[in-house]
Amino acid sequence: MSDSSPTTGSRFGAMLFVLALSAAAALTLLFTTVDPWLDKAGILAGGLDVHIYREGAWRLLHGHSLYADETVGGLLYTYTPFSAIVFMPGLAVPAAWITDAFLLVNVGVLYACVLLCWRMLGYRMTPRIASIAALLAITCLFLEPVRTTLFYGQINLVLMLLVLWDFSRPDASRTRGIGIGLAAGVKLVPAFFIVQFLALRRWRAAATATVALAATVALAWIVAPGESRQYWFSTFFHADRIAPETDPANQSIRGVLAHLSGGSAPVWLWLLLAGVVTGAGLGIAVALYRRGERLLSVTLAGMTACAVSPFSWGHHWVWFVPLLVHLVHRAQARPGWWIAAAALFVATGAWTYQWTPDFASVGVFVLPKPWHSEPILENAHVLVYAFAVLYALRVIWTVDRLQVRATPSIRMLDGSYT
């Protein structure tokens, strides 16, 4: 599976068998845990957000306000003016087809993300990797962030693909950073990776990403100056346009504080904790990158960006996908890591609960909370992030410890040494 440590014969067969089982289980759960055609919950009955994107593009094209009035479903448009330009091609697709069309696009993007993860781990793109990536992508369909991204017609997977594309390229690439700049121009959270470039002292990539982001703002200002002024000087500061921060779906540090206190989190406390987590997350991500763990580095940074954001929906945490790829990669050499991969699948799965015949909720954090389990279930994604941080620290410690051995060590593909 790679030039340095090929996986052949029985090992490849075993991995293929396990992933085939996981893919079958994921598809079964995806279509049986809730009626796939159930309104507001079934995987084939969604598309709300992609219709909001399409309406935003229509409003911009016809000179209507993006931010003053409600859009589809009574929701407000919360993205940048540049995003409405990006969504313009959606107007070429009939409204009746846009949901299914973008569902297929997102599935293809998911597969591309998984392939890029394997590439970042040092694997060559071979038929074996293509088949393993396909099975793993199918497995990821049942992860809550992926399932809800597909259901709503969200753009999270596309933005992650742009970020992974940038980080998969050589450090010396002159255009490295364009993907992150464009992603941040659509949704501001990916701007976190510009800070990661700065922390890594990748000055050219940081500058390229910043220029690309600035270009998206300038373009939108030329096309829609009024909407740009409204967004950057007013809408940008109104996080309450999204949802109350106490909403169980708010899987961020601010959400954790709100959940535990039963009310709005003190801004000063959130800023303090977010600052500490940002610094620690970036520091660990940099340490991982410098030790050759590029995929784990960008994954931890992506998860940190979700954790410190004022409001992070469950579907923002698509960074569980590369984390699962990383764990499966380790399992190809050490079977014990299949347990960690299975634990991640269970903890972040799209488990559903049907409250009434017409309503079901999706995600661990909105399940019924028995035995006083609210602090655990209601903050599930942030807790997984905390475990990921501890795991990343262990990886750093292991690499450093083995590098100081008196005898030479050979680094294996799974990050271990012999």
Image (cartoon, grey):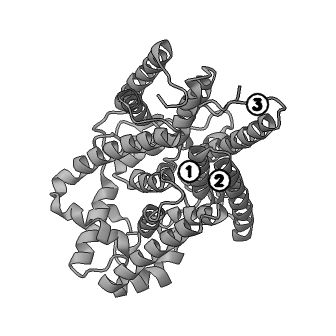
Distance (Cα) linking label 2 and label 3: 50 Å
Which structural element holds mark 2?
helix
Left or right, residue 56 beside residue 243: left
Mark 2 crowdedness (10 Å alpha carbons): few <14, some 14-19, many ≥20: many
Residue 219: image location, x then y, percent: 35, 80
Q: Residue at x 30, y 51 (%)?
A: 47
Instruction: State whether residue 188 is above or below residue 407.
Output: below
Mark 3 or 1: in front is: 3
- From this viewpoint, is residue 31 visible? yes
- From this viewpoint, is residue 346 visible? no
From the image, tell me which residue sits under label 2: 259
Distance (Cα) linking label 3 and label 1: 50 Å
> What's the amino acid at mark 1?
Pro
Left or right, residue 32 beside residue 323: left
Could you say which quadrant of the image residue 326 lies in? top right
From the image, tell me which residue sits under label 1: 248
